Amino acid sequence: MHGDLDMKKCFAALAELDRPGHMGRLMRGLIHNINGPLQNISMLLELMERNHTRMEDLVASLSDQDGSDLPRLLDSEKGRLGRLLEQVRLFSDMLRDFMILHEIEANESEIDVNQILERLGKIYKADLFFKHHVSLRLELAPHVPLLRVLGRHLVPALHHLIQNGLTALRAASEKELVLATDVFQDEVWIRVEDNGCGLSDQVPTEELFTPFATHWPSEVNEQEKGRNHLGLGLALAQHLLSPYGAQVRLEPMETGTRAVVILPVPGTFCRTKG
């Protein structure tokens, strides 16, 4: 009895520590991605400033010249201004997606599962591996009911499932991740599918939900040198969502793995504080 209580306390502490951790990993990618647009903005502004000086000189000397260079300079400035605005929009979109997801995690209102998956799909573009190597496909069911699940529980749980999917794709030749929802009479299903390394026939699926259990194949570990897999992602996802009566499953596919979160409708707020 005491052992079960200690394990629950341990999971609660791990989940609390993990919450800022998963956003921090994405934040590093966000900072890297923000740096590119900011450098482009700085360069474009410098070029525009230089051209404005030249245009001022041309306007001042129009009485002595035909001004044939002026239209070319104006077109050049218009193009740079358009690219500058596009960089600013890109920068703004990145920050907005992070802020919306942060608000979902902070609030205790009903949540829109499709919106969360859409935002996660955009935010994960801050992950360089995802951005440059992974094709994302969204298969979102229409009219998904709002669920009474705390965002600070669902978002980290989905993060772990997505992160597992990306890890499984490391050694795959074609890399595709699917984020999907399905609506049934009294359930909402969230699917995270990858066409990566798949599940081992030698390891029972339920064992993968045991804390500190990690069974990634050698080819994946080879691609992930320097990263320490703690084997906590699935255990934490299950811990965070089980108080809602939710199920977290792993299913083998012909190529890859399907992680499924089954949430009851109507969802109920967590029966424990956290």
Image (cartoon, helix red, strand yellow):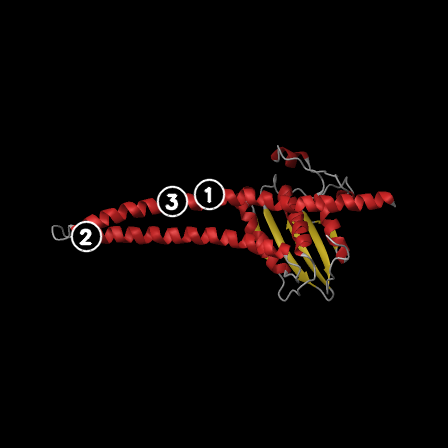
Above or below 70: residue 109: below
Residue 253 locus on image (x, y percent): 69, 49
Above or below 24: residue 116: below
Q: Amino acid at mark 3?
A: Ser
Q: Using the image as rendered, state which of residue 92 and residue 232 is in the foreground.
A: 92
Q: Using the image as rendered, state which of residue 184 and residue 110 is in the foreground.
A: 110
Q: Dot 2: what SS?
A: helix
Query: Does any portion of residue 235 appear in the rendered image?
Result: no
Residue 144 locus on image (x, y percent): 65, 64
Residue 15 locus on image (x, y percent): 71, 46
Q: Label 1, on which residue?
A: 35
Query: Does any portion of residue 89 appear in the rendered image?
Result: yes
Q: Residue at x 41, y 43 (%)?
A: 39
Q: Residue at x 85, y 42 (%)?
A: 3
- Report the Cα–Cα distance between label 1 and label 3: 11 Å
Q: Using the image as rendered, state which of residue 253 and residue 182 is in the foreground.
A: 182
Give whichever of discs 2 and 3 has the lower sequence position.
3
Q: Amino acid at mark 1?
A: Asn
Q: Quadrant of residue 211?
A: top right
Q: Label 2, on which residue?
A: 59
Q: Label 3, on which residue?
A: 42
Residue 103 lies left or right of residue 212; in this view the side is: left
Q: Using the image as rendered, state which of residue 156 and residue 231 is in the foreground.
A: 156
